[in-house]
Amino acid sequence: MASLAGDASAGPGFDYKVKGELASAPLLDCFVAAAGFIENLGLDVPSAVGQMSFAKDDPDRFFFEALSLYWRALEDHLLDQKPPVMTYNRMFALFSEHSPENLKLLSDELLRPMSHLMIDEFQDVSPQIVSWIRASLAEIRGRGPAMHVGRGAQRSSLLCVGDDWQSIYGWRGSSPSYFMEFGKEFPSPGTTRVMLSDNYRSHQHIIDAAEHIVRAAPAIAGKKAKASGEPKALLPVNVLDRDDQGMAARLMEHYGQGDTILMLYRKGSDKALIEKHIQSVVNVDYSLPHDARRLKQLTYHSAKGLQADAVFLLGDCQHLTSSPYKNQVYRMAGLGKAGDREAYDNAQKDEILRLAYVGITRAVSHCYWYVDGQDTQAANLPKASDRIGKGKAFFVDHRQGKTSA
């Protein structure tokens, strides 16, 4: 603590693991990650830390006390630079609902571009960004007709596009609640909802399998996609025990048939484990011009927006930890149900279902889901594969001890 308050020029040379995180990291990296999460929720770091409660001997108590000192000193240091430097979160906070007086300092010309907004991927918006949008629109409304002189539209508008079933970034502070409860979060004289239900990528079995997994999570009512475009053969999602050699053989078969392929994994370490089995295909594909390559290896999260003829999913989507500090700041931000003391953890249990949905719906025709065997410690923790339906035509479960057709 003394070094944080003094003239230290380098970070402490040790790692720390905040409760609820999957791995330890250098202390300063832990500071940045925790502060970023808190600020993404629209909260001030020192103020939020001041409201946290920890057991007297909990190491996280001292971690967050140190974070409060460090973050205040860091921001002061950045502002002392010539010219001053700010984090993105600090800039958004300056023009949020917590600081409406700052928006009044802006000219009509600077504020006018905020009058008509179209925002894509709105299911992944953070409370910080929502507060900035709402504050800007409130200031525009408050200035009245003068804001719209010379323009056809005499009122502001907000068009948000998204899919709450694809909200998979809650671990960094986003929430689908602003999209799901749009009318309440952005009150307006008139709101129009347009439901897009035609799916031109996947056949109906892929769609139905993914929706069966995710339907246990809260969602906008009335959602049901239907396959459109050229008819495709209805092939089930195949669920298999983890078998890297078997997966490699099947992948190479699809590659040899000319299919595009996505290999998606939950853990970065899995890429190296599987790549040694498919190195020959990787080498061939890499030798091709960029536009002619047909194999991509990515995490589930980074595959959003992509598609392939055949998708290989490596690993289950499972909620493995509980985060005491994130549960606390989630409540401070007003997220989760009233009285829910584990609001963040429960949101993550829904998010693992949405992550599996995203993975499955990357597939145009073929989807293979390879699931690891469960160790004793994790066996009873929630996982997306618990939702694999028995007796459903869109799933075939080949795992030992499992039967579905």
Image (tube, rainbow, N blue to C red):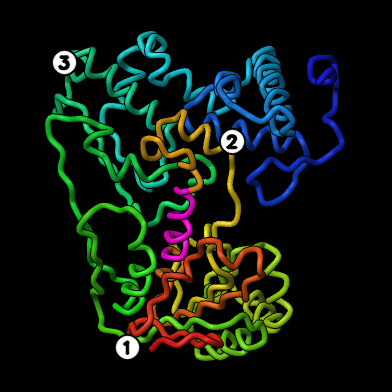
Numbered marks: total: 3
Identify the residue at image location x=37%, y=63%: 214
Q: Compared with residue 88, is residue 237 higher up or lower down, i.e. above or below? A: below
Residue designated by label 3: 145
The range drawn in magenta is: 346-357
Q: Secondary structure at mark 1?
A: loop
Q: Secondary structure at mark 2?
A: helix
Q: Compared with residue 249, is residue 95 higher up or lower down, i.e. above or below? A: above
Q: Position of residue 195 (x, y in %)?
A: 20, 55
How far, Cα to Cα, is label 3 from label 1?
56 Å
Q: Residue placed farthest to the front in the image?
A: 56
Identify the residue at image location x=51%, y=64%: 383
Q: Would you say the residues marked 3 and 1 are in contact, meaning their CB atoms lie under 8 Å apart?
A: no
Residue designated by label 2: 325
The N terminus lies in which quarter of the figure?
top right
Question: Tag on residue 233?
Answer: 1
Side of 232 relative to 314 (left or right): left
Q: Position of residue 212 (x, y in %)?
A: 34, 70
Q: Position of residue 112 (x, y in %)?
A: 29, 22
Please say whether residue 353 is one of the residues in the magenta stretch: yes
Please say whether residue 231 is one of the residues in the magenta stretch: no
